[in-house]
Every structure is written in structure tokens, then in C-alpha cells.
Image (cartoon, rainbow, N blue to C red):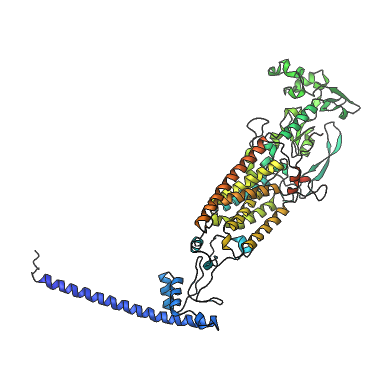
Amino acid sequence: MSAYHKPGNEVEGGEAMTAFAGGQRSATINQNNWNKKFQTMRANKLKTSVVDQNRQNTGNMDRTQRPNALTMMKNFYTGYKDPNTRAQTLRHGQAIPRKKTFGDNEFYGAEAGTSGGKVETDIRGDDKRNIGEGFLADLMDRDYKTLDKLPPEVRKQLRVKYDNRPYFTSWVMFVNIVILIITLATQSIAPIGFTDKLVTQQLLRHNLAYETVGYNQTTNFWIGPDFQSLIHLGAKYSPCMRKDKEYFDSIESDTEAEDKTGCCVRNDLNVCWQTVSTECTSTFSSFYDNKVCGLDEAGCTDTAYSNKTLWEGTYSTWPNCPISEENRKNATMPTLACEVSARPCCIGLQGECVIISQEECDFRQGFFFENNTLCSQVSCITEICGLSGFLFDDIPDQFYRALLPTFMHAGVIHLLITLVFQATILRDQEKFAGWWRIAFIYMSSGIGGTMLSAILIPYMPEVGASGALYGILASLLVEVVVNWKIYKNPCIELTKLLLLLAILFLVGLLPWIDNFAHIGGFVFGFLTAFVVLPHINYSEEDRIAKLVVQVVCAILAIVLFGLLFIVFYLAQGTSCSNCAYLNCIPFTDSFCQDATMELRPRVGN
């Protein structure tokens, strides 16, 4: 027990503490009462200010239409739900102008043309990307329903704000720029123009005579490399993606024609080249039928090819065992003793193989094979396609070209157009849907557009993100369809968007633009956007209906992908003659020459 404790102190101390607590409660109550009076005074002042403002706004409105004090206070507390905002408003004694926020139905005060203090606000309210809004929506000046005309469950969904970071847009723009920089740094820029340019030059040809040689060089109005270079870097080109039946049939025909050639020897200069008899017309030349210049069993010293059965049959089956330089000088057979002045050279977009001199091959920007004698001994398609080559010789398998062209561009102008679209519409859509949804739509549309183009125009090189971008445009169309009820005039908004798409598809009828990629990308963008884009559910029945549509669209997208790959790889030769008019309309005979679906003639000297 403490020395200072006395038995009577407990009672006296308890009474003192009780009295002290009671005084504190009284002071708190008085303070609260004062605060209520102060707020009431400020509220009355605020109501007076608002009533004066309403009188100015409403003009000669009927007295029964004007808001009473209770309605105004209710609207005040509804409009300023944040206690700090209310306190600040009361402290200033007047209504602080407040920006309308997305999802508000009414706020304190009245505007001209409204009654009862109710303000009809549309769904637009801040800088964030909300359902139905966006860059293109602002460009088309879309009109939305006011939120008070929408059901409560819809208003609740519209309060959800989307402000995703454009990670995918930034990444894909960076990749596009880097790839074009690498392309321009490693490849020469083609002549700028719309039609092929005839290039001529006087050269010392394989027959040791100076002649004027010319060829049609492809031009590029996008300010970039020629299409042969684009194929070498990864452009869409069907013969590089599959063992194209028509392409390899033409190679087989070339091989059969080569078996009918012979060796033309110019006796006065001791040079020779492989050709047909009609091309060996020089006075000093002799033609040796069924012979190959510089290649024969008698001149082959490699023991691996000593078996006589290897030298039976046609030229194309002979091993590549040319005579050595030392043995050539001692050879007595004219076709072995001569110096071969022409060898295989792969030229053009389709890798035509011709027997010409190295100087002429370099002039025609071809691939020269100095250690081969016959075209049947080389694989032009391997050289034309480039990149990683093929896993097995003469079996093209670069299936990744279905996606790679989406990140490539034909030139500077082509890239700038893509970047403008990506920085505006693609970025805006990603801000709304998020990076993984937009990446899924973008990639799916790009692959779908490339595959459709590869089927219908297999021999026309194609690069660019047009298929993917049209898929993004299709997602804008889906956004209007699935959120139909938030627009005042949804039919008008849909018509505006369809007119824009129609104009873009008409532009695709020009011969330098791949409209098949646009169509394929649009179809897959439409289906995949239905599956992954956020949308509004107006009721439980509407939610179930949209879920069914999502499942159907997902199945259709998978089936169409499967059909495209099956047709491309297994059903080659499928043609659609009238489909060419969807890609280019031939106003003149040569207007659509760059959009042809035919395989061009291959053999030439």
C-alpha cells in the first residue's frame, strides 16, 4: 500500500474525475452545436447564392419549376459527396465550379435548358479512355445519351475508367523504326516511281562481245529498297513459305529445257558457254550437242564420283564435279579444254536462273554461282529468300513470314503512315483495352491478312502492318456494335465508321496496296475484338447473349485460321479469277501489272 494512500481519497478522486469528464462532454457538445450553426449559416448563404444564380439562368420559368431549398441541398450533397469538398464549398460561401466527372447524373446548381437543378451529362468527363470514346470518336463528333436516360446498372458500368499504359504501342513502333533503319542501312534504295524502270548498260558478255544489256528494275515510290531486297529480308512471299507447286513445276520445266542444251565453243578465243543450238551462231563457234561445258566424267578426278552410273541419264542428275584448271589445260576434248565464260545466275523477284557472265549478273543484281555450270545444280529460291535458309534443301519452310512482314515496311513514307496510325488510333485503343488485348487483336489480324494474301496473290511480295491496322479498325466497329445503346443515334455513328472503312478499302484497289491483307486483317480483327474487348451488359439476358456471341466468334476465328493454313499448304492451286478485282481494278492494260497473281516466265539469257 502506498504511503500517500488514505481510505477516503478513492471516493473523492472518483467524483472529481466524473465532474471533469462531464465538463469535457459539455464543451464538446457546445462546440458541435456551434459548428452546426456555423455550417447552417454558410448553407443558407450558399442557398441564397444559388437561388440568385438559378433566377438568372432560369429567367421567366414558372415558380413551380424552380428548385426548392430541400432539393438544392440534396443536389448539393449528391454533387459533392467528398466531405472535404463540401467543407471547402461551405467555407467559401458559394458553389465552387466543378468539372463534370464520368458517371455523374446530376450536381448542385442548374443550367440553362434544365429544370430542378438536374444537369444531363454525357458519358464523357475526363482525359481517361472510357467505353465508346476515343480519338476517332472525337474526330467523328459522336453524340452520346445522357446518363440519366440510361439504366442504373449501365451507369454503374460506365463509371469504370480505362487508363492503361500503351506498352504494346510503344514497343511495336520502336520495332518498326529499328527494322526500317536496318533495312535502309543494309540495302540500297530503289528508284522512286510507280512502274518498272528500264536500265541499260554496255557490257562484255559471255561470248566476249560488247553488247547493250537491259532489264526492268522494280521501283519503289515509298522511298525504300526494291522488292527483291524485301523478299530477302522477310517479306511475304509464298515460294519461301511452302514448296509451291506451281513454282517448282516451272523449275522442273526449266530443267527439262536445260537437258536439251549443249556447249557452244568459240574456237578463236577458246571460251565456251552452255546454251541452245539456235544461240550458238557465231562464225567461229562450234556447238556440241549433249555436252556440258567444263563438266564430264573424263574430267572429274574426285573418286567419290568415279561410279559410271552417276554420269548416266540427263544433265540435271550429273554430279557437280567440274574439271580443274590444271586438267583443263591438258584436256583434248573441246568442251573440257575451253574456259567457261558463263555460269548460273539467279535474278528477279522469282529467282529466274540464267547462264550469263559474272559481270552481267552483277549488273542485273543477281546471285552468281562461280563453281557451278548448270542451273539444275543451284537453288535460286534459297538465295532469293535468304534469312535463315531452309531446314532441308529445296523445301521452303519459312512459315514465320506469316507474322514477320507485319513489322516491316517498304520505305520511309510507308513507315510514317503506320506510325501516325499507331500513335493515334492504336494507342487510344490500347489505353482502353490494355496491352494484351490489343496485342492479341493486332497479331491475329496481321497473320490472318498475310495468309489470305499469300493464298490469293502468292507471287507478289508484301510488307507492312496494314492487315493488323485494319484489325484495329474492326475493333472500333465492334465497340460501336456492342455498346449500341449509349449513343443518341447509333445508326448514324455506325454509318460514319462504315463510310470511313469503305474509303480505305477503295484506296486498297490501287496496284501498290495489298487489299487482300486489309480484308483478312479486318475479318480477324472483327472476330477477335468481339472475344476480348470490354463491353457493357444492359441486362442478364444481354450478358448471356454477348457471351454466346463471344464463343461463336472465337470458334469462327480458330476455324478460319485452320482453313487458311490448310488451303495454303495442302490445297495449292486454288484460284479465284474474279478475286483479283478486290485487290486492283485494271483501268488500263498495265495498271495492275504489279498486282498480278500469275507466275512470270522464268528462262532467259
In the displayed structure image, the side of residue 87 where residue 313 appears, left or right: right
Q: Could you say where residue 434 lies in the image, as x and y percent from the top left?
A: 53, 53
Which residue of the protein is positioned furthest toward the right in this rendering?
283
Q: Is residue 338 above or below residue 453?
A: above
Q: Could you say where residue 47 lies in the image, as x and y percent from the top left?
A: 45, 80
341 and 430: which is toward the camera: 430
Q: Could you say where residue 393 lies in the image, as x and y percent from the top left?
A: 66, 30
Q: Quadrant of residue 447?
A: top right
391 and 111: which is toward the camera: 111
On the rendered image, what quadrant is the C terminus found in?
A: top right
136 and 489: which is toward the camera: 489
Q: Quadrant of residue 216?
A: top right
Which residue corresponds to the image point at 54% horizontal and 81% vertical from the top-left? 58
560 and 161: which is toward the camera: 560
In the displayed structure image, the side of residue 573 where residue 434 appears, left or right: left
On the question of residue 300 being in view, the answer is no
On the rendered image, what quadrant is the N terminus found in?
A: bottom left
Q: Could you say where residue 418 lies in the image, as x and y percent from the top left?
A: 65, 53
On the question of residue 44 being in view, the answer is yes
Which residue corresponds to the image point at 62% horizontal and 48% vertical from the top-left? 524
Q: How many marks?
A: 0
Q: Is residue 566 above or below residue 529?
A: above
In the displayed structure image, the side of residue 392 where residue 107 appears, left or right: left
